Structures are given as structure tokens and as C-alpha cells.
Image (tube, rainbow, N blue to C red):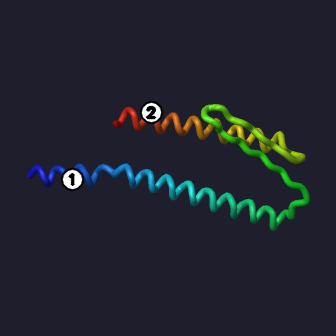
Amino acid sequence: MAIEENRETFEEDVPAYRKIFALLMIGIILIVVGMMVILLATVLYGGGSANAGAIIFIGPFPIVIGAGPDAAFMVSVSIIIAVLSIVVFLVINRKWRLSG
């Protein structure tokens, strides 16, 4: 009887490694889709000038880098993405602490 109960609770809960694998696959898919969008935009609009924006985290401190004519826009987008990623990390971390 106890074995059947354990099977039922195990089937209802998703193991942690499956959640991590699902997040990894979602990340890889988003990267591939992003590269396709960039490739498509380059082919359709043809790029004469290049823009770049990046954010590098060293510990809790972000370093923002931008180059090109629209560097301010690229840096702004990078900062927004960085803030969103920190918020998502904190929310997920809090949920895991409360559930575990």
C-alpha cells in the first residue's frame, strides 16, 4: 500500500532535473530564435551600419558596453534585459526556497 502511495506522489511531482532540463531547452530555443530574427532582419533590411550593446555581470555589478550610432538604445535594452533577468532569478529563487 505504501509503495502505491509513493508512486502516485512521484508521478504528480516533476523531478528537479526535468525542470532544469526544460529551462535549458527553452534557453537554447530562445537563442536560436534570436539568431534567426537577427539573420532575417539583416537579409531583409541589409545593414550598412553596425550597433552593439552588451551587459557583463561580474558578481552583482553590471558593466554596460555599447558601440555604434544607436548605442544608447542598445545599452537601454541591455539594461532592461539585465533587470528583468535579476527579477526572474529572485522570483524563482524565492519560490524554490518556499517550496523546499
- Label 1, label 2: how many angstroms apart (C-alpha)? 27 Å
Q: Name the residue at the front extreme.
A: 58
Residue name at image x 61 percent, y 38 percent: 84
> Quick one: SS at disc 1?
helix
**Mark 1 neighbour class, 10 Å CA radius: few under 14, some 14 to 19, many 20 or more:** few
Query: What amino acid type should be assigned to the residue bearing mark 1?
Result: Glu
Percent coordinates x, y for residue 72 in the rendering: 83, 39
- Determine which of the numbered discs, if any, sits on residue 43 in the image: none
Is 78 displayed left or right of 72 in the figure?
Answer: left
Percent coordinates x, y for residue 96 in the rendering: 40, 38
Sequence order check: which comes first, mark 1 or mark 2? 1
Is 9 displayed left or right of 1 in the figure?
Answer: right
Query: What amino acid type should be assigned to the residue bearing mark 2?
Result: Arg
**Mark 2 neighbour class, 10 Å CA radius: few under 14, some 14 to 19, many 20 or more:** few
Query: Is 56 located above or below residue 25 in the figure?
Result: above
62 or 80, which lies in front?
62
> Quick one: SS at disc 2?
helix
Residue name at image x 45 percent, y 33 percent: 94
Q: Which residue is mark 1?
A: 8
Q: Which residue is mark 2?
A: 94
Quadrant of the drawing holding the C terminus = top left
Residue name at image x 87 percent, y 47 percent: 68
- Of circles 1 and 2, the one toward us is 2
Is 93 displayed left or right of 44 in the figure?
Answer: left
Q: Name the residue at the left extreme.
A: 1
Q: Could you tell me if the residues under marks 1 and 2 are in contact, i.e. CB atoms within 8 Å?
A: no
The mark tally for this picture is 2
Task: Say which quarter of the image contains residue 18.
Answer: bottom left
Residue name at image x 78 percent, y 44 percent: 74
